[in-house]
Image (spheres, rainbow, N blue to C red):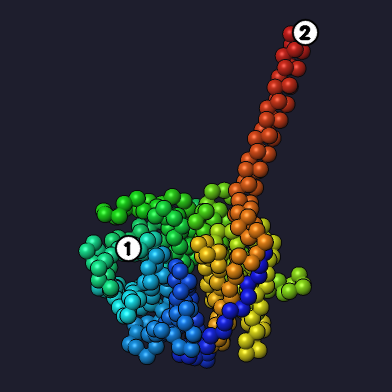
Amino acid sequence: MAEFKKREQINLPYFNAQTDAVAALDFSFDARYLAVAYSNGADVWDLDKTNTVPISTTHGRRVTGRIRSLAWFPTRHRLILAHDSGVVYVVTFGINSVATAGVREPGFHQNAVSIAVLNDNLFAVAFTKTVQIRYERPGSQDSLEGDWALLGCLKSPPAIQGLSISSLTIDSIHTIKDQRLLVSYGKMIIVEWLILSVEPFYANIQKLIHAPGSVTDVSSNDSYLISDNAAGSYQLFSLLYSSSVTFIPRYPGTDMAQQISAAKFLGRDLIIGGGNGQLVLWNTEASRLQNLKVDIDKRSHALIEKFCCIYKASSDVAYIAAVVGGSSQMIIWEWNGSSALEPKQHRETVLNHVSVQHKVRKCRLNLNLGVMFLILMTVFVVILKYRIDN
């Protein structure tokens, strides 16, 4: 397959490497915009233009706490910023203007930690102890800002094997598909929710799962990724069956393991994980496909903690953006699938690998049960024949 090539390196003009830390970065649905949030500000870059300064920034404006998370809407140039003060801002990019709407319930002061967008009119914000669901009021879609009302909150999950989940802090929240959410608690419990009704709001728990770490990303094929800090690896799991795949970033040319940060899906069938001075690209069989090395300001071994990626199926193009810890430099890589040898066939093969493995295991189980049944029947016939003869 074709490899990712470095497209450009961007200097973050308002980022102070000594005092700031990158909180999150994310591509818009069409990969036109790239948003970067750090400490008390956020920049938005137009990747269709020469990038010397961002087209929009909150730097220097009055803000309410540090930005903890950000996310784009699935088909609109609309960005959500969640602050640790509990305030959530919805920023909409019009043709010639930018509009911002801030939302927070009176008297509510929990820190916002993560965002999950369900559709263009519905999103969830995870705070330390609760999850709020907000929607755009009917009739306000014509307004650039929108009118975002609190639809409801997810109820506290029940205890699992004597462990009170409500006592744990929420790590992250993710959208799967079909109005389903995955919430990670205390780096040890995962709860799958299904929103059954919007008005009136009603959501039901589908699964409670023990996990070896916090969820870092999910895929629309019901797979999810976990950072297992104790084992120093990334784990790929599925909501459909119990098998898993392990990914370990290593120094190129050696078996020496590196530190881990987070892992993300590129499309549904490729995995990207952070390591020391590099991002590693795997397929879902844990075969390494490429090492994307970073060497900025002599930080060749710095852990890559914050990055994002996107695959555009319509044009068969993919992008990755990463910020090296302690650096004000952002690198963007580009992959053009049209230059690869049978890229789509390769991706489809990889995509189906996990489900094929599951079918093979199921066939083997059925075969083993069949063999056991034949053995038992044989023993039964022998015993029966012995009794008849005697």
In which quarter of the view is residue 152 placed?
bottom left
Residue 233 sits above or below residue 159 on the image: below
> Who is closer to the viewer here, 261 or 285?
285
Can residue 196 be seen here? Answer: yes
Any mark on residue 389, and which? 2
Q: Pinpoint residue 130: horizontal percent, then vertical percent.
A: 37, 65
Q: Is residue 117 left or right of residue 210?
A: left
Q: Pinpoint residue 25: horizontal percent, then vertical percent.
A: 48, 76
Q: Residues within 10 Å of mark 2 (few under 14, many from 20)?
A: few
* Lower position in the chain sequence, tag 1 or tag 2: 1
In which quarter of the view is residue 4 placed?
bottom right
Instruction: Give the residue drawn at x 52%, y 91%.
Output: 18
Residue named by callout 1? 121
Mark 1–mark 2 Cα distance, whole angstroms, equals 78 Å
Q: Pinpoint residue 291: horizontal percent, then vertical percent.
A: 67, 72
| Amino acid type shown at disc 2 | Asp
Q: Is residue 35 left or right of residue 328?
A: left
- Tell me the element at label 2: helix
Any mark on residue 100, and which? none
Quarter of the picture holding the N terminus? bottom right
Circles 1, 2 touching at the beta carbon (< 8 Å): no
| Amino acid type shown at disc 1 | Asn
Instruction: Give the residue drawn at x 57%, y 56%.
Output: 237
Can residue 163 be seen here? Answer: no
Q: Residues within 10 Å of mark 1 (few under 14, many from 20)?
A: some
Q: Pinpoint residue 293: horizontal percent, then vertical percent.
A: 66, 78
Residue 277 sits above or below residue 383 on the image: below
Looking at this rendering, what residue extends furthest in the top direction?
389
Instruction: Give the residue drawn at x 71%, y 25%.
Output: 374
